[in-house]
Image: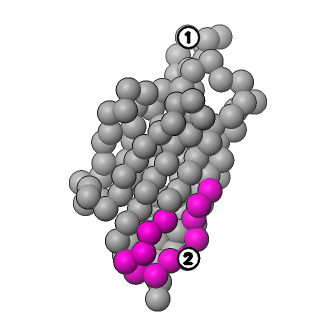
Amino acid sequence: QVQVVESGGGLVQPGGSLRLSCAASGIIDGIGTMGWYRQAPGKERELVAVIDSSGNTNYKDSLKGRFTISRDNAKNTVYLQTNSLKPEDTAVYYCNVWYWKNSKNRFEPYWGQGTQVTVSS
C-alpha cells in the first residue's frame, strides 16, 4: 500500500508563513516528481510547485519568490515553504507523488487527502 500524508496546514494571518510537509510511505520501488497543488472554494485545482528527483523545480508564476518547494529523498518527503501569505492563498493544499512501479514499468500518481491553509486576520 502506498500512502501520501500532508501536514502543516492551519490558520495564519496575512503576511505570515507556513511550512507544509508531505511524506510518502508504503511499498516504494521509486519516486519521481513530487509536487503541491491547491484548490480554493469554487475553483479548479491548480499547480503550485513541483520538484523532480534531481531537484529541478517548476512554480506557478505568480507564486515565485513567495513559495519554495524542496525535498528530502532519504525521507521520501517534500516540503512547501509559504511566505508572505495572502488571503487569496486560502485553499486546500494537496500533495502529489509519482511512484515508480517495477511491476508495471511505469510511474503512477498518488494524491494525499489535503491540508487546509486559511489566511485571515
Neighbour class for label 1 at 10 Å: few (<14), some, many (≥20)? few
**39 displayed left or right of 103:** left
Residue 41, how many percent across, how many down? 49, 70
Q: Is residue 38 magenta?
A: no
- CA gap, disc 1 and disc 2: 41 Å
Which numbered disc, 1 or 2, marks the residue closer to the eye? 2
Mark 2 is on which residue type?
A: Leu
Magenta range? 7-18
Query: How many numbered callouts?
Result: 2
Residue for badge 2? 11
Quadrant holding the N terminus? top right
Residue sitting at 44 percent across and 69 percent down?
Answer: 17
Q: Which corner quadrant of the image does residue 116 belong to?
A: bottom right
Report x, y in % for residue 25. Answer: 68, 34
Q: Is residue 22 above or below residue 85?
A: above
Work out whether residue 9 or residue 47 is closer to the camera in this orientation and state it: 9
- Let me know if residue 110 appears in the view: no
- Residue at 43% over, 27% down: 53
User: What residue would you read off at disc 1?
Assistant: 105
Position above or below: 40 against 95: below
Q: Which mark is residue 12?
A: none
* Residue name at image x 59 percent, y 61 percent: 8
Amino acid tagged 1: Asn
**Does residue 24 appear in the picture of this structure?**
yes
Q: Secondary structure at mark 1?
A: loop
Tell me the residue at 65%/47% (across/down). Answer: 5
Question: What percent of the width, then of the height, locates residue 18?
Answer: 49, 65
Secondary element at tag 2: strand
Whether residue 10 is in magenta: the answer is: yes
